[in-house]
Image (spheres, grey):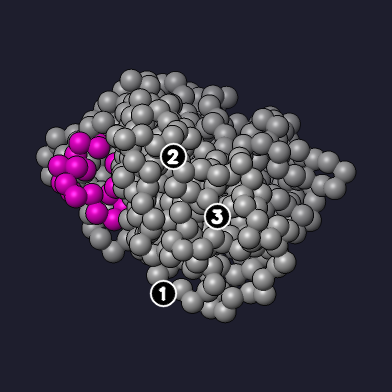
C-alpha cells in the first residue's frame, strides 16, 4: 500500500486554476490565491502540486510556514521564505532596492543594521515587494506561505500590502488557511471582495472520489475496493482525504484489511482507534474554546454524534448565554454544525471528533456523564417516545447498568415489533437478551425471549428461534411462574408451562387445557416434511403415513392427557405463525405444537389436540 495517493483526486478544477495563475506570473501578471479548507482537506497537497508545477516550468519557489510551536516569532513565514534566496547560492541584485535594503534587515539577518525605528509595516511591505520582483524577473516566482491562520499580526500586515500590489508583477502568492475564525481568513475574504485575490474553498470529497482515493492507495481498481471498508471510511472520514489515508493505514496495520491472491478483503473489525496525531489536532482546536468549552463538548460526545441542546443544558447546568457562546465558537472552529431544521439539535462535524474527546475522558468520568445524560433525558421525556428509548438504553449501558439498559432496549424492540419493523425489533431485542443474560433477572430475560421468538419466526430465522426456545424452556425449569394453560395468540406465552419445561404436571401445576381454537377430537395426520407455505388456504396433498392412524402410539408416546410428550425442539405455545415444516425432526401431535387460527380452513386445524 502507498502512504499517499500517487496523484491528486477530486481537485481538477483547483489544479487548473493554479496552472493558469502560474502561467500568468511567468507573463508578468501575478496575483494571490488563497487555499481555504478545514484541517486534512488537502490544502498542503494541492500547494505541493503547485510547487512541483512551478519548478517544472523554471520558476523560483520561496516557501515559508507559520507555526504555533514555541514562542511567537514575528515575520516567521516571511523570514523563512526570503532566507531561501540566500541558501540557493544565486547572487542577489540588491542595488535596485536602494534605501529599502536596510529595512529588510528585520527579515534578513545578513542585512540587519539595527536601525528599525523609522520603518513601518507599509515600508517593510514595499521592501519585500521590490525584493520579490527583482528575484523573479525574467522567470516568475512563487511565494508559498502555509498555515497563514497561525501567522502573527505583523506578518499579516505585510501580506495584506502584498495582496494589493502583486497584480502586475512576476510573483504569485499562494497561501493556505483553515476555515476557522482567524484574522487570516478575514484577510482572504476582504481580498476576494476587493477583487485583488482569489479564494479556492476545498469541499469534502464525494463518495466516488473517496473510492478512487482508496483504490489509488491500495494499488487496485475502484470496483475492487471492499464495500465494507469503503462504507466505514466514508462514514468516519466525512470526505477528508487525510482521514481516509490515516484510517486506511490503521485498518491495514491492525490486520482488519489484508491483501490476498484475489485482492484486498476484510478479515477483522474495521473500527479503529483515533491516531495520536489526529486526536492531537482535534483537541488542539477544542482547547482554544477553554475549559468550559471542553467540558461542554465532552458531555455532548456522550450523547452521540447528534445531541439536543435541551438535554445538554440539563446535564451541565450551563446558562443559555454561555451555551450558545460555546456552540458558536465550536461552529467557527469547524467542530460542530447545526443539524436539521430543528434549532435545538447540533452535530459533530466528524465522527472522529467524538472519539478524540473520549480519549480525554477516564472510564469513570464517561460513565458518570452517561448516567447524567440518561437522567436528563428521562426528566425531559418521561415516556421516552420514539428514539429517546434506545438512546437512554445506550446511555444506561455506558453508565454500567446493563439490567436497566436491557429492559429499555426490550421496550424499544416491542414498539418496533408493533410498528411492523421486524428487522429493527430483532436487533433491539437481541441486544436486550444479551445484556440480561448475564444478570439475575431471569423473568425480564424470559419476557424478552417471548417477544424475540415470534419476531424471529416472522423473519424466517427458525433455526435461531429453536435455539432460543431451549433457553426459554430452561428459564421455565428454573422456577418461573407459568399460566394454567397456554393461550392461542399470535405471540408466545408470558412464560412456559411446567410441561414445556420438562416436568410432570402436579396438582399445583395442572396439565394445560386444550386451546379453544383447536378441536380436541382426533389426532393429527402424519405430515410431509417437504416445504410448504405457512397455513395455506387450501390443504396440501396428504402424504401417506408411515404408520396407520388406527395403530396405537408406542408406549413412549402414551401420556396421560396428551398424544405425545413435550418436544424440547419446539417452544410451548399456540403461535399460528410457526410453520409445520420448519422443524429439526418431524413433530408429533401434542399440546405444545403450534395451532392454526380459529378461522383457518386448512385440514391442519384438527391437528392440535390433547
| 388 relative to 192 in the view: left or right | left
- The residue lying toward the viewer, choosing from 57 and 103, is 57
Quarter where residue 296 is shown: top left
> Which secondary structure lies at badge 3?
loop
Q: Position of residue 193 (x, y in %)?
A: 38, 64
Residue holding disc 1: 599
- The residue lying toward the viewer, choosing from 388 and 144, is 388
Q: Residue at x 63, y 74 (%)?
A: 540
Q: Residue at x 54, y 72 (%)?
A: 603
**Residue 140 visible to an observer of this rendering:** no
Callout in the foreground (2, 1): 2
Start-end of magenta stretch: 373-393
Residue holding disc 3: 589
Judge whether 600 appears above or below 176 on screen. below
Q: Earlier in the sequence, mark 3 or mark 2?
A: 2
Marks 3,2: beta carbons within 8 A? no
State the CA–CA distance, disc 3 to disc 2. 15 Å
Name the main secondary structure of what is drawn in magenta.
helix
State the CA–CA distance, disc 3 to disc 1. 20 Å
| 248 relative to 502 in the view: left or right | right
Amino acid at each position: 500500500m502507498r502512504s499517499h495517493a500517487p496523484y491528486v483526486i477530486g481537485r481538477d478544477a483547483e489544479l487548473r486554476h493554479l496552472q493558469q495563475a502560474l502561467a500568468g506570473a511567468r507573463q508578468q501578471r501575478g496575483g494571490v490565491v488563497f487555499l481555504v479548507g478545514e484541517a486534512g482537506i488537502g490544502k498542503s497537497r494541492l500547494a505541493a502540486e503547485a510547487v512541483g508545477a512551478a519548478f517544472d516550468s523554471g520558476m523560483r519557489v520561496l516557501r515559508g510556514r507559520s507555526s504555533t510551536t514555541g514562542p511567537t516569532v514575528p515575520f516567521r513565514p516571511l523570514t523563512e521564505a526570503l532566507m531561501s534566496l540566500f541558501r540557493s547560492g544565486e547572487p542577489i541584485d540588491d542595488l535596485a532596492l536602494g534605501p529599502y535594503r536596510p529595512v529588510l534587515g528585520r527579515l534578513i539577518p545578513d542585512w540587519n543594521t539595527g536601525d528599525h525605528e523609522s520603518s513601518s509595516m507599509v515600508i517593510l511591505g514595499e521592501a519585500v515587494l521590490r525584493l520579490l520582483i527583482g528575484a523573479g524577473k525574467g522567470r516568475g516566482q512563487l511565494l508559498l506561505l502555509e498555515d497563514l491562520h497561525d501567522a502573527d499580526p505583523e506578518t499579516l500586515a505585510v501580506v495584506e500590502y502584498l495582496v494589493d500590489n502583486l497584480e502586475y508583477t512576476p510573483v504569485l502568492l499562494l497561501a493556505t488557511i483553515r476555515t476557522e475564525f482567524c484574522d487570516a481568513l478575514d484577510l482572504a475574504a476582504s481580498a476576494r471582495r476587493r477583487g485583488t485575490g482569489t479564494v479556492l474553498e476545498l469541499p469534502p470529497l464525494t463518495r466516488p472520489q473517496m473510492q478512487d482515493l482508496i483504490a489509488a492507495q491500495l494499488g487496485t481498481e475502484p470496483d475492487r475496493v471492499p464495500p465494507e471498508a469503503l462504507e466505514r471510511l466514508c462514514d468516519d472520514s466525512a470526505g477528508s482525504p487525510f482521514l481516509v489515508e490515516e484510517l486506511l493505514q490503521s485498518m491495514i496495520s491492525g490486520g482488519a484489511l489484508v491483501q490476498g491472491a484475489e485482492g484486498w478483503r476484510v478479515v477483522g473489525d474495521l473500527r479503529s482507534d483515533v491516531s495520536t496525531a489526529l486526536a492531537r489536532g482535534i483537541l488542539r482546536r477544542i482547547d482554544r474554546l477553554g475549559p468550559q468549552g471542553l467540558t461542554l463538548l465532552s458531555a455532548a460526545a456522550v450523547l452521540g454524534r447528534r445531541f439536543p441542546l435541551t438535554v445538554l443544558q440539563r446535564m451541565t447546568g450551563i446558562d443559555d448565554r454561555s451555551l450558545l457562546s460555546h456552540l458558536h465558537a465550536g461552529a467557527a472552529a469547524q467542530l460542530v454544525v447545526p443539524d436539521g431544521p430543528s434549532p435545538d439539535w447540533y452535530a459533530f462535524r466528524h465522527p472522529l471528533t467524538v472519539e478524540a474527546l473520549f480519549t480525554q475522558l477516564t472510564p469513570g468520568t464517561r460513565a458518570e456523564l452517561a448516567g447524567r445524560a440518561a437522567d436528563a433525558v428521562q426528566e425531559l421525556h418521561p415516556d421516552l417516545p420514539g428514539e429517546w428509548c434506545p438512546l437512554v438504553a445506550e446511555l444506561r449501558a455506558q453508565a454500567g447498568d446493563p439490567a436497566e439498559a436491557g429492559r429499555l432496549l426490550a421496550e424499544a424492540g416491542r414498539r418496533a415489533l408493533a410498528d411492523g419493523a421486524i428487522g429493527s425489533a430483532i436487533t433491539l431485542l437481541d441486544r436486550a437478551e444479551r445484556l440480561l443474560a448475564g444478570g439475575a433477572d431471569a423473568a425480564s430475560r424470559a419476557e424478552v425471549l417471548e417477544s424475540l421468538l415470534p419476531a424471529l419466526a416472522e423473519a424466517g430465522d427458525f433455526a435461531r428461534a429453536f435455539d432460543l426456545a431451549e433457553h426459554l424452556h430452561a428459564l421455565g425449569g428454573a422456577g418461573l411462574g407459568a399460566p394454567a394453560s397456554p393461550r392461542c395468540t399470535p405471540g408466545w406465552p408470558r412464560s412456559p408451562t411446567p410441561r414445556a419445561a420438562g416436568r410432570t404436571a402436579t396438582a399445583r401445576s395442572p396439565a394445560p387445557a386444550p386451546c379453544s381454537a383447536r378441536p380436541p377430537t382426533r389426532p393429527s395426520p402424519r405430515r410431509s416434511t417437504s416445504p410448504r407455505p405457512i397455513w395455506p388456504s387450501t390443504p396440501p396433498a396428504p402424504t401417506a403415513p408411515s404408520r396407520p392412524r388406527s395403530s396405537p402410539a408406542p408406549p413412549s408416546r402414551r401420556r396421560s392427557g396428551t398424544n405425545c410428550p413435550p418436544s424440547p425442539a419446539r417452544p410451548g405455545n399456540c403461535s399460528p405463525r410457526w410453520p409445520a415444516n420448519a422443524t429439526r425432526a418431524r413433530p408429533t401431535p401434542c399440546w405444545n405444537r403450534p395451532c392454526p387460527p380459529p378461522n383457518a380452513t386448512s385440514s391442519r386445524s384438527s391437528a392440535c389436540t390433547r
